Amino acid sequence: MEITKDSKQLIEDIGIRMEERLHISPLASRIYALLTLSASDGLTFEEIRETIEASKSSTSVNVNVLTQLGYITFYTKPGDRKRYFKVAKYYQLESLELYNQSLTREIELVEKINEYNKAQHPEKFALEESVGIITQDYLRKTQSLVQETIQSLSQFRKNEKQL
């Protein structure tokens, strides 16, 4: 697979973001980025390894991690022993569901902090009340948007299965 300088830079940019967001290794994030930009029929292990310019063992470990996490999937073709890897179709849905759970925990924690400060440090709470309220408001609005997106993706998935 031939890759341009611009493609390499985009893989790097996506990879850096995925590394931060998914908390995966730099190599795994670049493999994910490469597969995000590849054709819908996916790439073979060798194509991934050659494009990313990594060793067989490093590529294998990171492809396995991404597969186990559900970020990528593979399929085979009749009469072909190769596996073709591609981004898991509904990875975004699963990722958003985890993010929604994380937001719920964060909202609960901010509420506890606000309640504690209000009861234990009323003078501090009076000075910082608006910060706590702004934070709660932001988290709730973010969670609402995430929930709407989850509903949209779930509906899309349901409609697709019915076709």
Image (tube, rainbow, N blue to C red):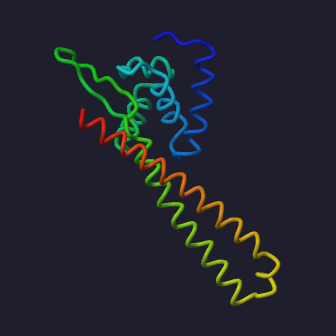
Residue 145, x across and y down, in percent? 54, 52
Q: In the image, what residue occupies the spot 42% across and 18% down?
A: 39
With 8 as the anchor, is 120 left or right in this view? Answer: right
Q: Relative to 22, say whether 39 is above or below.
A: above
The quarter of the picture where the C terminus appears is: top left
Q: How many marks?
A: 0
Residue 70, x across and y down, in percent? 36, 42
Foreground: 13 or 122? 122
In which image quadrant can residue 77 be found? Answer: top left
Q: Relative to 102, say whether 80 is above or below.
A: above
With 48 as the anchor, is 10 left or right in this view? Answer: right
Q: In the image, what residue occupies the spot 26% across and 27% down?
A: 75
Residue 107, x across and y down, in percent? 57, 68
Q: In the image, what residue occupies the spot 51% across and 22% down?
A: 52
Residue 20, x across and y down, in percent? 59, 44
In which image quadrant can residue 155 be found? Answer: top left
Q: In the image, what residue occupies the spot 61% across and 61% down?
A: 139
Residue extending furthest toward the left:
79
With 55 as the anchor, is 136 left or right in this view? Answer: right
Residue extending furthest toward the top:
2
Foreground: 52 or 129? 129
Q: Relative to 35, say whether 29 is above or below.
A: below
The quarter of the picture where the N terminus appears is: top left
